[in-house]
Amino acid sequence: MSEVLRLHGLGAVVEVRCTGSAAAELAAAMRTAWSRCRVAPAISPVRAEPLEVQLEDVAMLPYRLMTTTQAVTRALIFARAGGLLMFHAGAVSDPRTGRSVVFVAKGGTGKTTLSALLGQRLGYLTDETVGIDESGVICPYPKPLSIRRTSDVSIKDEVSPDDLGLLATPERAHVGRVVFLDRQPLVDGVELEELLILDAVVGLAEQSSSLPRLTRPLHRIAGLIDRTGPVIRVRYSEAAEAQEVLKDLCRGPL
């Protein structure tokens, strides 16, 4: 038995074929988790290489959902390599204006937590990979949020943004400001630091995907910064405090 799902993100589409004796359970769970990526965009998407995901034991469903999210993300990134500027980042957007804040960070440093908090009041774009075209428009990737379990940190639960009550993605979102997240347990409150252009370009390059496939990639990053303003490093210890700064950046310059 098999079932095929078409998932959209980053301006691309990937077909995922669920196979195995527990294919029905896998497909049902993916339809729920990937609810916002099952809606086709108005513009014809780029086609990614199809994936096959097998599940034989229902007890392995959470693990298979986690690894499938990783595989889907890789497939979409590969499909858009050379076209989009892509960062390891979360992003949310002002529902009225489409102005968005992109928060760049290494894995495991708070992108998903902030996406879940900010998405209660701002449009959810992604918690993992932000794709930006040459004009600064964001190609949304409203994937399930990958939430690490406290009981087993090796497993992340893939939770639909609909189940978390996150606001919908605006029709057209653009980059308003880029920030670096710097979570420091001993920081009191939130500290902001404007980065020099060279430091910002190097830092963003380090947290990018498929950068060498772009034409003049560092100029592309510098151009984005020139349009949106200095990159800000946000040092914080608690996501609840940092979210207020990021929310304000969606509304306009600090």
Image: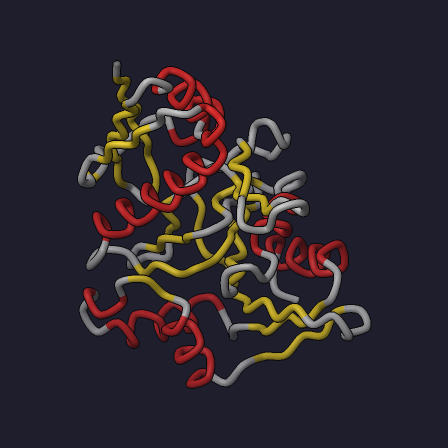
Q: Say if 86 sits above or below 191 in the image.
A: above
Give the position of the N terminus as an image quadrant.
Answer: top left
Q: Residue at x 65, y 68 (%)?
A: 183
Q: Say if 105 sits above or below 119 in the image.
A: below
- Horizontal and vertical percent for residue 6? 29, 27
- Horizontal and vertical percent for residue 178? 51, 65
Q: How is the image coloured?
A: secondary structure
Instruction: Please state if 83 lies on the left or on the right of 225 as rendered.
Output: left
Q: Say if 44 sits above or below 244 in the image.
A: above
Front one among 112 and 168: 112
Q: Quadrant of residue 84?
A: bottom left
Q: Residue at x 55, y 48 (%)?
A: 92
- Horizontal and vertical percent for residue 78? 23, 52
The total of numbered circles placed on residues is 0
Q: Quadrant of residue 166?
A: top right
Q: Quadrant of residue 210?
A: bottom left
Q: Residue at x 62, y 53 (%)?
A: 251
Q: Say if 72 sits above or below 253 in the image.
A: above
Front one among 48 and 123: 48
The residue positioned farthest toward the right in the image shown: 188
Give the position of the C terminus as an image quadrant.
Answer: bottom right
- Horizontal and vertical percent for residue 127? 51, 48
